[in-house]
Image (spheres, grey):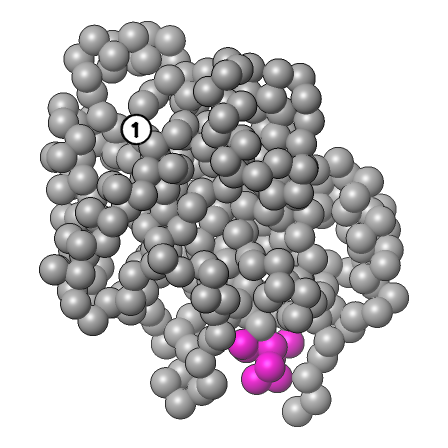
Amino acid sequence: MTMKSIAWVTDSTSIIDPEFAKNNHVYIIPLRIIINNECYKENIDITIDDFYEKMRQHEKVGSSQPPIGEFIELYERLKEVYDEIIAVHLSSELSGTYNASMQGAEIAEANVIGIDAKVGAYPIREMIMRGIHWQKKGLSGLEIKAKIENIIQNMSFYLIPASLTQLHRSGRVSGSQFVLSQLLRINLLLRFDEGKVVVVEKIRTMKKTQQALLEIFKQDVGLVSDVCIMHSNNLEMALKLEEDIKAMAPDIRTEIMTYIPAVAVHAGEGTVGLSWIKNTSINSIHPGAAPLVFPEALFA
């Protein structure tokens, strides 16, 4: 079977390593970070350290989708070079990026296979990396999309925001909820559900919130080979979660990942997340197949 040439298009929330992207025909369109009316291309015009410094200094912090023109220009180039184009973007419930990408493809008259990942960060990276693996096995774009959709059905993504301040500023938490939570010192356990971020539990202490998250993970632990711990400048809590997971399941591979600015804009500095994908016969990489090669820089 002849392998078709496939271009992969994604956004900066995918946290794909730039070198990996360059070597595997992955094109990354950056989201915009808005700080005090100044616009920055995520991971290009501003580093994560600079972002946190500026976020501490300014209350007016936000994010926006890439302009549609960038997608049009990219798709006009890619359609002349590749047999197929697969675009995987963060949840359309949280950003207009996916819709801008699809509109750009239509205007450019490019045949693009679009996938709304319904999340961001680690799961998107997994979708693309596994997709490239399946591409090398000779699968078509539509066959790969079916497998990626199985990943979406079997992924879990939970968040523990360190503070509701930034969620309130970004409009994710109402004023009354924010005031009440501050008075009662409530911690939230959040999760992605069909692309939206919803509240799972409201818990009085951070320790109990972490325990609740680990109990949820424990229910799936027998079906999981990898788990990713993500954090917004809170390595200490990330390492503690990793320690607890290793004690629960020593054979599971753990990875610690730093959130990109677009997540911290809404969730706030100190937020920690946990994500995993349940293995199925459809979405797993066959044991006899060549292993995926991950950039060492992504691992703690």
Report the span colored magenta.
133-140
Residue 20 seen from this side: yes
Q: Residues within 10 Å of mark 1 (few under 14, many from 20)?
A: some
Find residue 291 and report its horizontal and vertical position in percent.
44, 81
Q: Is residue 137 magenta?
A: yes
Residue for point 56% across, 59% down? 17
Find residue 50 and report its horizontal and vertical position in percent.
54, 32
Residue 98 seen from this side: no
Q: Is residue 203 magenta?
A: no
16 or 45: nearer the viewer: 45
Q: Could you tell me how many numbered marks the image carries? A: 1
What secondary structure is found at the residue carrying circle 1?
Answer: loop
38 or 112: nearer the viewer: 38
Q: Is residue 71 above or below residue 234?
A: below
Residue for point 68% across, 47% down? 29
Residue 82 placement, left or right of 54: right
Residue for point 14% across, 24% down? 204
Q: Quadrant of the C terminus?
A: bottom left
Residue 141 placement, left or right of 147: right
Find residue 205 and report its horizontal and vertical position in percent.
14, 27
194 or 18: nearer the viewer: 18
Q: Amino acid at mark 1?
A: Ala
Residue 39 placement, left or right of 298: right
Write down the residue under mark 1.
162
Q: Quadrant of the N terminus?
A: bottom right
**Where on the picture, by quarter, is residue 179?**
top left
